[in-house]
Image (spheres, rainbow, N blue to C red):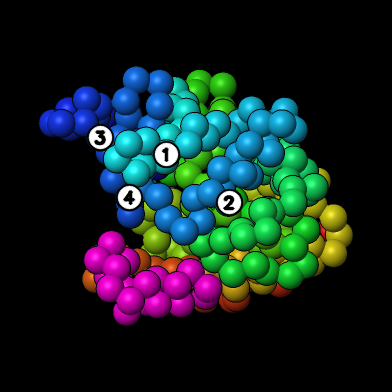
Amino acid sequence: MKADRGEEELAGHGGERLAGGGVNDVVRIGTTVRRPTGPWTATVHALLDHLRDRGFTAAPRAHGIDAEGREVLDFLPGQVAHYPLSDQVRTDATLRAVGKLLRSYHDATADFVPPPDAVWYGPVREPAEVVCHGDVAPYNCVFDDGGTLALIDFDTAHPGPRVWDLAYAAYRFVPLTHPDNEDFHLPVAEQARRLRLLADAYGLDADDRRVLAATARQRLDALVRHMHERADAGSAAFAGHIAAGHDALYRSDAAHITRHEARLTAALR
């Protein structure tokens, strides 16, 4: 569901391709979305069922696998953000909404018991306090005029610490980017202010505040490693991202965070 709501008809599928999926081909059919499955799909569906049972409504429901072997999920109406980001996505109100949404999601997963044969896209990270979404970014959030509505694309979900997930959301939404990043950049003082805003909206504790900036840098390092591992394993999508210079951009942003880590961390006290 990582997509804008496009109208391109797919011959033979009776649906429309949702433009913007960076790795997967995603199709809307009526009120559902059809996506490719992976070894982790059954585990993710169990997680989505758990969220439904806990009353967390800001995620799609899972409806099994269709005759073509694709997972079937709710289509969530609204707009999914892509770069360059709209003014709405850049606001303090949206940043607060993201922090509150992520806290609500994490709290709903805290008592999730994975199936005995659970498979996750990425490694389990300790302490496994919650189930991390794994890719909290504008392109995986559905928005309307009132702010953030929901999280989508749970393929990268995995158990881990709260701060691991929040750190990547901070990178994407604050954002913690180098001045050369043309997607969205703010002066360091404004980055520090907005990082505090996100942490406050989430209700982040003192221990995690001390490591939030450093964790954002570690998260980008892990992302670069993952991109190269997948490209080396034959993924055309990740090879294309590397050819486009995405890994170099992440390295530059990681260096920026390291350079200003003390100032960012001081703003969180």
Residue located 50% across and 21% down the image: 145
Stretch in magenta: 221-239
SS at mark 2 in the image = helix
Marks 3/2: CA–CA distance: 25 Å
- Amino acid type of the residue tagged 4 in the rendering: Asn
Marks 1/2: CA–CA distance: 13 Å
- Amino acid type of the residue tagged 3 in the rendering: Arg
- Of labels 2 and 4, the one closer to you: 2
Mark 1 vs 4, N-terminal side: 4
Q: Is residue 174 in view from this perspective?
A: no
Marks 1/4: CA–CA distance: 16 Å
Label 1 packing within 10 angstroms: few (<14), some (14-19), many (20+): some
Label 2 packing within 10 angstroms: few (<14), some (14-19), many (20+): many
Q: Which residue is mark 3?
A: 17
Q: Which residue is mark 2?
A: 43
Quadrant position of the C terminus in the picture: bottom right
SS at mark 1 in the image = strand
In the image, taking residue 164 as reference, residue 32 lies left or right, namely left
- Of labels 1 and 4, the one closer to you: 1
Q: Which residue is mark 1?
A: 65
Mark 4 vs 3, N-terminal side: 3
- Of labels 3 and 1, the one closer to you: 1
Query: Residue 27, position in %: x, y?
Result: 30, 35
Query: Residue 109, position in %: x, y?
Result: 73, 46
Marks 2/4: CA–CA distance: 18 Å
Quadrant position of the N terminus in the picture: top left
Mark 3 vs 1, N-terminal side: 3
Residue located 42% across and 55% down the image: 38
